[in-house]
Amino acid sequence: MTAKQVLFVVPDENDPHMGILIDHDYIICAECGGVFEADEVFIIKTYHVWVNFEDEIADELDLLVAKDIGKELNSKGKFGRYEWKEAIKREF
């Protein structure tokens, strides 16, 4: 089994979260405990070193930037995988 920490978003909700990707199949959300299939979400960033989620969720600039992107997309009425791909090109 492989596990990596990720910053991800459910594209139709525009609300980024941090979680643990298991075997490239499932993501366990570190914020709500929900389980998502990897193909249901858009992975914004994969962390190659293990981080402390408590610190990351509270202070992580990547998460804050991603949440701002989500708010901007919401205000423009834009949703979906393509919109996220385009929006994060400028930031990540």
Image: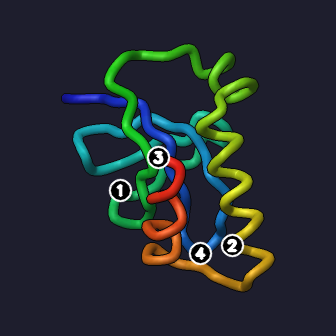
Nearer mark to the viewer, of 3 and 1:
3
Q: Which residue is mark 3?
A: 92
Residue holding disc 4:
12
Give the distance between the C-alpha atoms of the residues marked 4 and 1, in whole angstroms: 14 Å
Residue farthest toward the bottom in the current orientation of the protein = 77
Indicate how the structure is coloured in the image: rainbow
Give the amino acid at mark 2: Leu
The residue beneath circle 1 is 38
Residue 9 placement (x, y as % from top left): 54, 57
Counting residues from the start of the chain, the first of labels 2 and 3 encountered is 2
Q: Residue at x 53, y 50 (%)?
A: 91
Residue 83 numbered tag: none
- Circle nearer the N terminus (1, 2): 1
- Left or right for 54, reference 24: right
Point out residue 74 in the picture as x, y percentages from the top left corner: 74, 74
Measured Cα–Cα span from mark 2 to mark 4: 10 Å
Question: Regarding mark 1 in the picture, which secondary structure is present there?
Answer: helix
**Three-letter amino acid code at disc 4?**
Asp
Q: Earlier in the sequence, mark 3 or mark 1?
A: 1
- Label 3 secondary element: loop
Amino acid bearing label 3: Phe
Q: Give me the residue at 19% from left, 29% from top.
A: 1
